[in-house]
């Protein structure tokens, strides 16, 4: 199971209703943080996310509403006694940002912080990691901004235990070999092929995160076939001209991206302070007209996705 927790769903400035940009993804118990607006560490506490579970932090760009919470989060993780390695991914310059704050505020980190910078010149990156590949591409914004996605490796097919029993496979190591894709030979000389009891390989989870951006091909590429796309919807249709000028998207445009990419579910986030609670039904309706499987995120909302939902 995969869980997406929208920690902060506002844009530019916090409001009474929404904190600044940050999304947590819980995968196999590990927590990945996407963007770290001011107040993210408070939202993590409210969401009851354990600091020791945080393994990766992805930063899209250097606008304050996406990064001002990062130094505070890192120092709080240290004070919480975290010892796990944390990998920080971001645009070129993210290491300098961290070093500046360490020097200026005179703090050190007692846990290992691995920093992976994406060069400004890169048109696309794929980072192979254990059990998955992490992808990023530049989006279309007023400053250099990265969209992120992770795609888990293919999973083994379903094991048909009843079929194996019918074929006379005894319990123990031989069953494990079949499940691992190996063919086996029984004591009576019969060869049992793994494919006789194991189904076709199945896709793993795929999550895409595209905030801040105008509609662009990179968002479609990162989200192609994803379980879930978290996409900005800073404005709604009547402010489409403002969205275009400022390098943002409307809810309707986000829905069109989701439809084009063939995602399973769209989560709208990063709403302008102009989007008041009484406007939310209109925003969601505009998106659902193009892509019915759309949710409008609120702070600390949780979305779960099972493999079986594919």
Image (cartoon, rainbow, N blue to C red):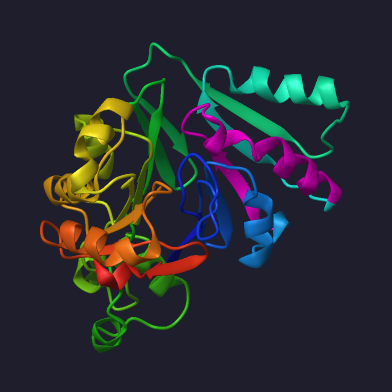
Left or right: 66 as drawn, with respect to 102: left
x and y, in percent, of residue 142 in the image: 37, 22
Q: Where are the magenta residues, as a range?
A: 53-79
Please state the horizontal and vertical placement of residue 274, each as a whole percent of the image: 38, 49
Name the one closer to the observer, 253 or 188.
253
**Residue 176 among magenta residues:** no
Determine the residue positioned at 57% across, 62% down: 29
Relative depth, front residue between 223 and 38: 38
Could you tell me which residue is drawn at 53 percent across and 43 percent down?
13
Query: Is residue 224 visible in this depiction of the protein?
Result: no
Quadrant the C terminus occupies: bottom left
The quadrant in which residue 232 appears is: top left
Seen at 29% across and 85% down, the residue is 168
Quadrant into which the N terminus falls: bottom left
Residue at the far top: name it. Answer: 121
Q: Residue furthest right?
A: 106
Left or right of 196: which side holds 135?
right
Q: What residue is rendered at 21% in x and 33% in y? A: 241
């Amino acid at each position: 199971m995969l869980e997406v927790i929208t920690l902060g769903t506002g844009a530019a400035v916090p409001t009474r209703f929404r904190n600044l940009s940050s999304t947590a993804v819980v995968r196999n118990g590990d927590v990945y943080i996407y963007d770290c607006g001011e107040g993210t560490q408070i939202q993590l506490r409210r969401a009851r996310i354990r600091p020791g579970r945080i393994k990766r932090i992805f930063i899209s760009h250097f606008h304050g509403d996406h990064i001002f919470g990062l130094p505070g989060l890192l120092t709080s993780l240290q004070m919480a006694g975290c010892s796990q390695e944390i990998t920080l991914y971001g645009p070129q310059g993210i290491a300098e940002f961290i070093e500046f704050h360490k020097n200026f505020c005179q703090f050190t980190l007692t846990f290992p912080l691995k920093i992976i910078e994406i060069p400004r010149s890169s048109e696309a990156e794929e980072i192979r990691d254990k059990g998955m590949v992490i992808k990023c591409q530049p989006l279309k914004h007023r400053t250099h901004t990265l969209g992120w996605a992770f795609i888990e490796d293919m999973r083994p097919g379903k094991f048909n235990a009843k079929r194996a029993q019918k074929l006379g496979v005894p319990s123990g190591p031989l069953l494990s070999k079949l499940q691992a894709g190996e063919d086996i030979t029984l004591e009576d000389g019969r060869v049992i092929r793994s494919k006789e009891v194991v189904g076709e390989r199945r896709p793993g989870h795929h999550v895409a995160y595209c905030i801040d951006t105008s509609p662009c091909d990179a968002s479609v590429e990162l989200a192609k076939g994803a379980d879930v796309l978290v996409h900005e919807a800073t404005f709604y249709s009547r402010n489409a001209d403002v969205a275009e000028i400022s390098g943002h998207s409307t809810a309707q445009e986000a829905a069109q991206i989701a439809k084009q990419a063939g995602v399973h579910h769209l989560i709208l986030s990063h709403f302008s302070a102009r989007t008041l609670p009484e406007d939310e039904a209109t925003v969601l309706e505009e998106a659902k007209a193009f892509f019915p499987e759309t949710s409008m995120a609120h702070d600390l909302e949780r979305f779960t996705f099972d493999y079986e939902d594919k």
